[in-house]
Image (cartoon, rainbow, N blue to C red):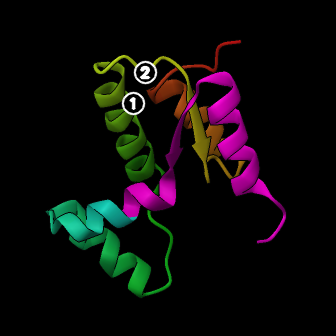
Amino acid sequence: PGSGKGTQCERIVRDYGYTHLSTGDLLRAEVESGSKLGQMCASLMKEGKLVPMELTIGLLKQMMITLSNSGATKFLVDGFPRAIDQAVLFEEKVGTCKK
């Protein structure tokens, strides 16, 4: 906290046209939706457990598809991955990063 990540995200979005995706925001929205997945996430978070990376990747992928259908082409993912195994699985399930 307090290192300026949010400020940098805002600048990258503004200056380079990326679409900002926050895993925390996606998870909170899913919980607020009341869906079965949201209920499961809420239960895990209430217990202080991490939401499985497969679920987080699924939420990210679905949002990226939705936004791509609206014209988004570049994404800045905030809060994920936090470990190499998460990055590897993200690339397997969603795709590799492009320059």
Residue sitting at 55 percent across and 36 percent down? 89
Residue sitting at 51 percent across and 25 percent down? 92
Residue sitting at 55 percent across and 22 percent down? 74
Q: Amino acid at mark 2?
A: Ala
Q: Residue furthest right?
A: 3
Q: Amino acid at mark 1?
A: Met
Tell me, yes or no, if residue 13 can be seen here. Answer: yes
Answer whether residue 11 is magenta in the image.
Answer: yes
Tell me where the magenta segment starts and ends, as one range: 1-27
Q: Residues within 10 Å of mark 2 (few under 14, many from 20)?
A: some
Q: Main secondary structure of the magenta part?
A: helix
Q: Residues within 10 Å of mark 1 (few under 14, many from 20)?
A: many
Q: Residue furthest top?
A: 99
Does 74 sit left or right of 97 as displayed? left
Does 78 sit left or right of 83 as displayed? left
Residue sitting at 24 percent across and 69 percent down? 32
Hey, which quadrant is residue 65 in on the image?
Answer: top left
Up-down: is 47 above or below 88?
Answer: below
Which disc number belongs to residue 50? none
Q: Which residue is mark 2?
A: 72
Which is nearer the N-term, disc 2 or disc 1?
A: 1
